[in-house]
Amino acid sequence: MLSTATLRVLLCLAEKDIDFELINVDLASGEHKKPHILSRSPYGQIPAFEDGEVKLFESRAISQYVSRKYAGKGTDLINNDPNKAAMESVWMEVESHKFDPVTMKLAWELCMKRFLFGQNGDEDVVNAEAKRLESVLDVYETRLAKSKYLGGDSFSLADLHHAPMVKFLMDTQMRQVFDARPFVSAWVADILNRPACVKVYGVPAY
Amino acid sequence: MLSTATLRVLLCLAEKDIDFELINVDLASGEHKKPHILSRSPYGQIPAFEDGEVKLFESRAISQYVSRKYAGKGTDLINNDPNKAAMESVWMEVESHKFDPVTMKLAWELCMKRFLFGQNGDEDVVNAEAKRLESVLDVYETRLAKSKYLGGDSFSLADLHHAPMVKFLMDTQMRQVFDARPFVSAWVADILNRPACVKVYGVPAY
């Protein structure tokens, strides 16, 4: 099982058609807290990224670097027009500050607690966060009724940043929250069926 | 009292030396949930921003737009070199995903609960979040021992995005967490004494 943060970077590299070497970090043995990882990612989290002299951490910073540095290759993931790029930035921020906090809590309760500690999730927390997810996605539904993608007419990092967690939640009871919103549901199908996504997951993701 | 998100945008406009009109939104009467705000900021949060046809929300997206759109004015807040800009992005992401979640909880317990509901903060929560803030800032201390600013040699959006919450916490018991780390403390003094910061707050902020 790959981390959603690592999958975010892999999806970006696939969209940009860039070759890379993936080096596994053994989280089970605590390798991510060893010096060779901390020197690359000081909070001891994956992914850590290297491209020649450039050493980065934080998946969304890595995806922005790759999109700008390799602007001429593969899919354009950041608009060249500053006004259009601004709307992509808005929805990247919405992902970071609205979508991610709620869905990380849901992923913890629905899966990670059992995977790591053999515990069941807390049903009250799941119900409360599901309500929050509904409120978050109501705004997405309004946006996607007017715009094919979150940032505008074309697929961008704003959409890509969501894909790993959306894919994860599609295999949980939260799928119904997405499916209940037709424009959100069509967007999910679109972003998870992109060739880059199929390549990374090995199967159609939706 | 201005919101830290609004202050983030005001600091950016001051650094870029851009004139603007500030329109107050009466949060006490729930104006931020009325249609004229929701049409600009669909989660009903401030600030909402307009520049001609460009209408944005999310303070960090607004600051990035202003920095790119008005690249030739005032302080350069985003490096033109993509490798250097990448490190600024990393620390913008650290602010969003490490610093902001902890400090927003602290601001809630230390101030907003009393301001909004007349309740005292929960001491156990404050102590737990203070421990987390220490861990977050330990990594900042290591970074700032090697680099004058978070993104590199020059002040950037990575520093600016922190300033409003840092300023807020300097007036609380959390100040000691910053003061206990010499490089963090010097960085706080530097960013809060910038002319733009003094202009926005009306007094030296540190």
Image (spheres, coloured by chain):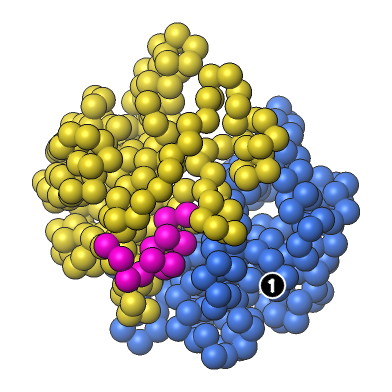
Chain colours: A yellow, B blue
Residue A201 or residue B35, whichever sits in front? A201
Q: Secondary structure at mark 1?
A: loop
Residue A170: image quadrant is top left
Q: Is residue A97 visible?
A: no
Q: Which residues are magenta?
A: A62-74
Q: Residue at x 69, y 72 (%)?
A: B155
Q: Tag 1, which chain? A: B
Q: Residue at x 52, y 30 (%)?
A: A25
In the picture, measured across the screen, residue B115 lies left or right of residue B180, that is left
Residue A81: image quadrant is bottom left
Q: Position of residue B150 (x, y in %)?
A: 69, 61
Q: Residue at x 48, y 31 (%)?
A: A24
Q: Position of residue A164 (x, y in %)?
A: 32, 40
Q: Is residue B177 visible?
A: yes
Residue B1 or residue A40, whichever sits in front? A40
Above/below status of B200 relative to B158: below
Q: Main secondary structure of the magenta part?
A: helix
Q: Pointer 1: what residue? A: B155
> Is residue A9 found inside the magenta-colored segment of the image?
no
Q: Residue at x 62, y 88 (%)?
A: B74
Residue sitting farthest toward the top: A118
* Residue type at numbered disc 1: Phe
The quadrant of the image that shows the N terminus of chain A is top left
Q: Position of residue A70 (x, y in %)?
A: 38, 66
